[in-house]
Amino acid sequence: MANRFFKKIVGGTNEYERTPVPAASLKGNKSFLGMYAGEHTAGTEFVIGPLFVAHGVAAGDLVLGLLIGNLLAVLSWALITAPIATSKRMTLYYQLERIAGKNVVRWYNLVNALMFCFLAGSMIAVSATAVGIPFNLEMPTLTDWLPRTPGWIVTVLLLGAVVTMVAIQGYNQVSKFANVMSPWMILIFFSAAIVGLSQLGVGSVESLVSVAQEVIWNGVPLPGMSRFSIWHVIFFAWFCNMAMHIGMSDLTILRYAKSWTSGFAVFAGVYLGHFVAWIASGILYAVFLQANTGSQEFAPGPIAYQTLGIAGAVCVVVAGWTTANPTIYRAGLALQGIFPKVATWKITAIVGGITSLAACFPALVMKLLDFVALYGLLLMPMGAVIFADFYFSKKMGFREEGALNSGSDFSLPALLSWVLTLAFCLGLNYFYGIEIFFLGLPGWFVAVAIFVILSKVKYPLAKSLAA
């Protein structure tokens, strides 16, 4: 009975998991504008903006850092990820399988899927903080790792079930949901900034500058929190989606684009979400702290409700949803790469269950900055492998898609590029104290270099072909 029910929902959905996307299924910029605006003006913004306030970022550092970091992120999507996506038109997972082999990709897909599950789980938890308001649900604090009440667990499990029902219907439904919801959410974020500033006493440009520098982003971290500089802001804005752009996860999304220029569509997302929304949510948190002096509560729902009432709470619910939807979709495709004979919708349903269980733990929200940096770092080396294989194989004299063209299920150059790069980054962190936010940039170049050198040894081209 259940099997027939899900088959009716997904109908004839074809996600082209192991074939290039055909021309008839390609989409224009509008589809990507809506999806990226929805995904990046979403639940994470209600967490990251307040965490910048908690970490004592100064106002000037925040604005300049976001302008620079987001520009670097847009260029990474448009100039690195999109050209490969529209040339190959394959999912990240199948493309990587052709380069690294099934035995390597199986482990990568497992790590990838788990990271996406945890990220989607944090967004379901964000939505739960708003759903729980009318039920007086006890909210998590900055130091919480475990759920406080059974009510919290019930709430996130129910929300997880609803989100999963949308995600199993495939990319089309995920995209439609984002297109419908994102314009409204963007207006809410703008409204939040205006109302919040009014509640903080802003009535002129002079008072705006004063309140921003002395009340909201005053450069003083909350007790127990480290202080962030402009470099933290730049690198976090650039690399908070490292797994998606230089890590190549968005090959799976951008393979549907008619042109590589659709990569620039992410501009709508990051400058509305990772600029306007981060600033707006930081203002909301400042209002919340002013009204709840000494409180350690850190729940996006009550923070938004403090300023915008019911509209703010509803926005938090929808914002968490629009991030969780495409994230569960990506995680489903990652696991589908391990179990290719199992229907994608079944895999996605399983992923939704794992995500819902992860959402029970508020630590995913409280440590979101560190988690986002970690999951991007774990996946980044394989993005560098795809980049190097696409651009350098013929130029540097080694076979493109080495595993496929050598008839192997295992590529040592790809595996060592992944493992040695992570070891290199761990060494920088352990021996030199370089924070996790800054490790992705040197790590990416190291991964490219390792893969090119080892591929020249393992998969050399005949001189006539190389020429």
Image: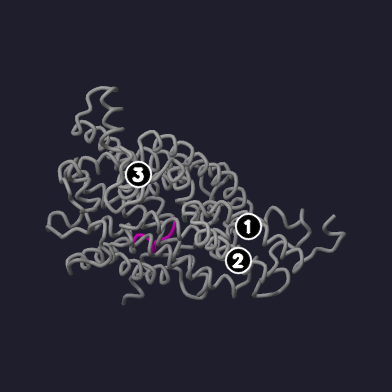
Which is more N-terminal, label 2 or label 1?
A: 2
Q: Secondary structure at mark 3?
A: helix
- Considering every residue shown, the one lying at the far front of the view is 431
Q: Picture quarter containing residue 419?
A: bottom right
Could you say which disc has been placed on residue 446 in the image?
1
Q: Secondary structure at mark 2?
A: helix
* Front position in the image: 78 or 204: 204
Q: Quadrant of the N terminus?
A: bottom left
Left/right of residue 124 with respect to residue 296 in the rendered view? right
* Front position in the image: 408 or 440: 440
Q: Which residue is under mark 2? A: 420
Could you say which disc has been placed on residue 182 in the image?
3
Which is more N-terminal, label 3 or label 1?
A: 3
User: Alpha carbon of mark 1 to alpha carbon of mark 2: how far?
Assistant: 9 Å
User: Alpha carbon of mark 2 to alpha carbon of mark 3: how far?
Assistant: 40 Å
* Front position in the image: 320 or 219: 219
Count of picture labels: 3
Given the image, on which type of amino acid does mark 1 rest? Val
Given the image, on which type of amino acid does mark 3 rest? Ser
The residue under the point 35% across, 52% down is 322
Q: Quadrant of the C terminus?
A: bottom right
User: Alpha carbon of mark 1 to alpha carbon of mark 3: how far?
Assistant: 38 Å
Neighbor class of circle 3 (other Cα within 10 Å; few <14, some 14-19, many 20+) is many
Question: What segment carries the magenta color?
Answer: 166-171
